[in-house]
Image (spheres, coloured by chain):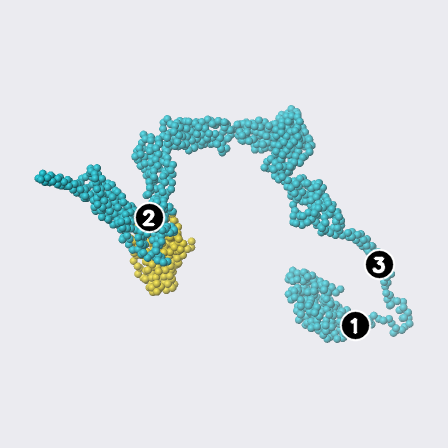
Chain colours: A yellow, B cyan
Amino acid sequence: PPAHLCLLTLLLPPLSSAAPISPAESISQAYSLALYMQKNTSMLLQTYLQYQGSPFSDPGFSAPELQLSSLPPATAFFKTWRTLDDGERLSLAQGAFLALTQHLQLVRDDQSDLNPGSRILLAQLGTARLRAQGLLGNMAAIMTALGLPMPPEEDTLGLVTFGASAFERKCLGYVVTREYGHWTDRAVRDLALLKAKYPA
Amino acid sequence: MALFVVFQTTFFLTLLSLRTYQSEVLAERLPLTPVSLKVSTNSIHQSLHLQWTVHNLPYHQELKMVFQIQISRIETSNVVWVGNYSTTVKWNQVLHWSWESELPLECATHFVRMKSVMDDASFPEPNFWSNWSSWEEVSVQDSLGRGILFIFPKDKLVEEGSNVTICYVSRNIQNNVSCYLEGKQIHGEQLDPHVTAFNLNSVPFIRNRGTNIYCEASQGNVSKGIEGIVLFVSKVLEEPKDFSCETQDFKTLHCTWDPGTDTALGWSKQPSQSYTLFESFSGEKKLCTHKNWCNWQITQDSQETYNFTLIAENYLRKRSVNILFNLTHRVYLMNPFSVNFENVNATNAIMTWKVHSMRNNFTYLCQIELHGEGKMMQQYDVSIKVNGEYFLSELEPATEYMARVRCADASHFWKWSEWSGQNFTTLEAAPSEAPDVWRSVNSEPGNHTVTLFWKPLSKLHANGKILFYNVVVENLDKLSRSELRSIPAPANSTKLILDRCSYQICVTANNSVGASPASIIVISVDPENKEVEEERIAGTDGGFSLSWKPQPGDIIGYVVDWCDHPQDVLQWKNVGPNTTSTVISTDAFRPGVRYDFRIYGLSTKRIACLLEKKTGYSQELAPSDNPHVLVDMLTSHSFTLSWKDYSTESQPGFIQGYHVYLKSKARQCHPRFQKAVLSDGSECCKYKIDNPEEKALIVDNLKPESSYEFFVTPFTSAGEGPNATFTKVTTPDEHSSMLIHILLPMVFCVLLIMIVCYLKSQWIKETCYPDIPDPYKSSILSLIKFKENPHLTIMNVSDCIPDAIEVVSKPEGTKIQILGTRKSLTETELTKPNYLYLLPTEKNHSGPGPCICFENFTYNQVASDSGFCGHVPVSPKAPPSMLGLMTSPENVLKALEKNYMNSLGEVPAGETSLNYVSQLASPMSGDKDSLPTNPVEPPHCSEYKMQMAVPLRLALPRPTENSSLSSVTLLDPGEHYR
């Protein structure tokens, strides 16, 4: 329960408050949320795979070659990543989580159609989307606090996925839940870097 | 010649005309070749869609035609399907035809061509096939897009058990592709280097979420990609079972069926099967919203017969069942109502009910069930019109019944309605049987106390609630008014005190309606006059088997009575006159309890006469306790054990005797004793007493001054009493008595002598030690004075130098210092008042020398050490014993010092102590006080340690409350010297 309360406070819209929040404070908030999210990402992926049948549910299933053009990859060369400035770093993460929220919604819709009885999976997908949205809000607060320009919101999904077969949609869900984990890991590192840069 | 030419010309012309005609006919047919053939694909249904036209058809004419169609795969020569398609063709009509491919169209190029032939009656034979149209090529592969691997068909819906062909297209032939169905590898047939097809026969239903089939492209061990499809396998739609329709009100038909398996699939691929009701006479149709029932409104009153078809349908299949019935034959009545009971009395009642009216002139068949005491008692069938009525008879009085009724259409039985029921209770009737009565009589001088007992009537005989019992007592010996007592239920006994007359007692049970027949008992003048021997019997398996001698004379029956334990309630059993044995068995008999049975004979005058007494246990138990044994007459060779107080009656079994166990050091058992091994494994001797009334045993042949252990336990047929501890007895010494015989007179003699001596003390003194005469008082003195010689004198006592005993008065206050510290002792002059100094006669007493300390060890060493020997200077030559005393534990020392400080503070001033001066020592300047002035370095001194009686208990430091006590002990140390 304390974790939930904590999460609730983290999910509060950060821009609504009249008093400006210091960068350190908003970074710290975002970092806490990212850390909390990190604990549940692998469980979401495992739950998702378990419901999709073979080969997804086979032990040790992994298909790194599966990628989505609509979802930016979380992997980056260290030097490239390290030399990013704050604005670029946050913009990339924000863009990724914006795409992830849309993709998670799509996956949840697909699964409610394919696995209508799987309340656990549907709940986890819903929660993941909510947390991604919360992190987006937190990142926006950091950018405001640092005086960085906000990237424009865009519809990353577009028209690409309609008419996909059931198997393709299962694959899509896999990539989305996997990338959600990768991006959360990256967000933790991003925010840790920022945290060190803007100490309280 | 001209004729020949003419003939030839004619022939040619004829031939020409014939040819012309023929060519005209041919020309008319040839253009009927199918043209403009276009082929399209439907990816969802995996079908080829053909459309074409037929040119040169006669205007406004319909012709029957047959088209032969050929379909090849991969290359034109590989024909996979040939078939005819017959249809009527109109002028300018575009024809359509579809062909479903087993192999997904994406996996192979298909080629289609066709030819046609006229098949119309209006055209005479012979008909010829047209030429083939050109091959039309269909290829979907080009539209696949980028990617290395493709699998088809996507998301196909098939029925369980059907055959499915799937295929993959691999762009790179270097890749090794393996395909799996639910994790199991499948093997296919290569159609071309890029395409492989798999024939899956009889696909199973695995789950409604579909079956995953996937292929993995790899080079070596490196996975290049994964692709898959989901095959949606539906369960086969079942035919609905148990389809039937019925009506309760002729307004609605309620149809029900068993739907069987739900064929719904996930991903919205197929919803649950739908059910539709179709009635063929009216032609009406209704889509049912529930999967197992549907209501059909009856609109036309005239329609009697219905023909229903129930159609179950999903995407793959349609199943239907049909029923044909007459409406009046399917009447399921609503349950009857207004169930009531009229004229209810003790044994019968009238039941009434109503039935929901269906149509006029309807006859109903009704079934009535009568339930009582939780079970069905009777069942009746009755035919009624609208109102039902039934007479229920042979009922039990004062009984609650439940009657219920259900009805059906009598003319065409379809099914019973639900039950409608109601409870009712019959009225009470007078009890039908006399209560079972028995008595116990206590005879006292002048009267009898008769206690009457009766058993409550059974429900069957009570016929209602028993309110009271009437007891009528009538004196048989003299005329007097009979006495009536009314005892309210549920009492089951009453006490009567009767004088010594014969009485007749009548008991009746009464309920609200009336009294039962009377139960009669006669009490004779002397009811229990007979002394009867008690006989022991053994119980068997929770019961007792009793038998008795038949009684001569008129006996109307026997009664056996006994008392229940522990409630102590009199129980009895009535036995017929021709029976002389019975078995008494109840659950109330408990093991280890003695039951006394009395058997009475009942005379015709209803007087009970005691015949026999029996006693026994339903199960004997081992005794629960052991007797308390007394040991008497203990001598050196024997003792007697007795347990007279032990009661043999109140035991959980018949005491058969006792076991006496005896343990001694001797290995051999005494005669009469047997060797026995106890439960703890130790050996001992055992003596068995077979008579339960023999409650003593003389154990003899014992050795003097030996210890014996005994243990007495009773035994029943079930075993002996509980294990208990042995009691020890030690035989006295053989000579001790003799000694007493000698010692007592001796003591007496000594006493006697002492008394005599006391009485005769003067005489003895005079005899044994007479007084020494004083020379001054002697008569000799006068003789000397008489001679007047002044030098001649008797030696004066004062001339001798006697050993002086000096009484030193101790100043107060110094004592505190004495014991305060050792240093103060050395500084103080008056430190040795408590000691007797035996000053030696030698003159070197002023020099340092050893000091001899006489110690009295019977006194507290520690205390004396710390208190009174401590001030003695310790020289290096001090004896070890002395050193030992000096180095006693510090803590004890300190504590004691404290104690003594306290105590000495209370020492009164001016206490005296004694200094003993040897008689042989030379007088020291006549000043006796100078003696103790130099005690710091006492000359060779012998010191007698103070004898201090300090109990050890007090020596241990207990600061305040003990201080006074220790001071008492220490207050007057000088006393010990005297």
Residue type of the residue flagged with mark 1 = Leu
The structure residue drawn at horizontal position 33% and vertical position 48%, both measured from the top left corner, is B165
Q: Which of marks 1 and 2 is in front?
A: 2
Q: Is mark 3 on a helix, strand or loop?
A: helix
Compared with B485, A66 (above or below) is below
- Along the viewing direction, whichever of B167 and B656 lies nearer the viewer: B167
Residue A179 showing in the rendered view? no
* Circle number at residue B761: 3
Residue type of the residue flagged with mark 3 = Ser
- Expressed as whole percent of the image width and height from the top left, the position of residue B954 reads 67, 61
Q: What element carries label 1?
A: loop
**Given contact means CB atoms under 8 Å apart, are the residues at marks 3 and 1 in contact?**
no
Chain containing the residue with disc 1 = B
* Circle number at residue B920: 1
Question: For residue B501, what is the image quadrant?
Answer: top right
Badge 2 crowding class, 10 Å Cα cut-off, few under 14, some 14 to 19, many 20 or more, is some
Q: Which of marks 2 and 3 is in front?
A: 2
Query: In this figure, which residue is indicated by the disc labeled 2?
Result: B165
The structure residue drawn at horizontal position 27% and vertical position 53%, both measured from the top left corner, is B142
Identify the residue at the far front of this view: B1
Residue type of the residue flagged with mark 2 = Thr
Residue B553 showing in the rendered view? yes
Please state if A29 lies on the left or on the right of B693 as rendered.
left
